[in-house]
Image: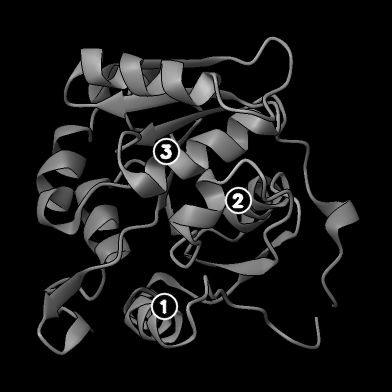
Amino acid sequence: MAYDATTLPDVSGLTVGIIGGTGDQGRGLAYRFARAGNKVLIGSRSAERAAQSAAEIAGLPGMPAGVDVTGADNDEVARRSDVVVIAVPWDGHAATVAALAEPLAGKIVVDCVNPLGFDKQGPYALTVAEGSAVQQAAGLLPDSRVCAAFNHVSAPLLADPEVDRIELDVLICTEDRELVDVVAALAARIPGMRGIYAGRLRNAHQIEAFTANLIAINKRYKAHAGIRVTDL
């Protein structure tokens, strides 16, 4: 059937935790979810740094009255959140995720990490033994509900208070079909976004790798390109 946003569940009451919430992508997603009215927890290895980042995000323009953004260490954020977004650098991905296996048990985990390398020719996709970052996460989190999403969202657009709408589709890969609607509903909290099911976890590697192409597009055209799926 064609995409129908009216069928999506109400996720306004979910607490969203961002592991890696002090980085560009994590901060941007935290800002957008908080701006939409969700309670947001910023996670970092340093609780002090997380609290500082949370205070900065809460003070940005466009925030609703009573905005609820707080910071804590990664373990506490994992325990207190309903949905946890993994937005850490690839180099620290496995260690960070593995350390949170117990507090993330039973939780929805959204991995938006892209394994990329950079050399004088620009960005390129790295080979991941498990197939993709999200497959690595799923293997380390056997008791969590895992998906890949938000891989292609521009951090500068997310963080810009003057940008009201971000017109793109969020591609969602997961083994858990019920999870698709929840994550799509979270994407729809950001005006202009749609969440689109894009296959099982084994299909995530090309989505993660395609970020290298988007970086090349952005460099060539001085843009913040995203993905839009037609005929939906």
Which badge, 3 or 2, is on the more N-terminal residue?
Answer: 3
Q: Helix or strand or loop: what does disc 1 sit on?
A: helix
Q: To which residue does mark 1 refer? A: 207
**Residue 74: x, y in percent?**
26, 25
Alpha carbons under labels 3 and 2: distance apart? 18 Å
1 shown above or below 78 = below
Calculate the distance from the C-alpha at mark 3 to the C-alpha at mark 1.
Answer: 22 Å
Seen from the viewer's position, the closer of residues 176 and 180 is 180
Q: Residue at x 34, y 32 (%)?
A: 105
Q: Is residue 216 visible?
A: yes
Q: Which residue is mark 3?
A: 27
- For this rendering, which residue is in front, 172 or 143? 172
First in residue order: circle 2 vs circle 1: 2
- Residue positioned 77% across, 43% down in the render: 9
Residue kind at label 2, given as amino acid type = Val
Dot 2 and dot 1 residues touching (CB under 8 Å):
no
Q: Name the image quarter holding the N terminus.
A: bottom right
Q: Which mark is residue 183?
A: 2
For the point 37% across and 16% down, the residue is: 71
Q: Amino acid at mark 3?
A: Arg
Find residue 91 and report its image quarter: bottom left
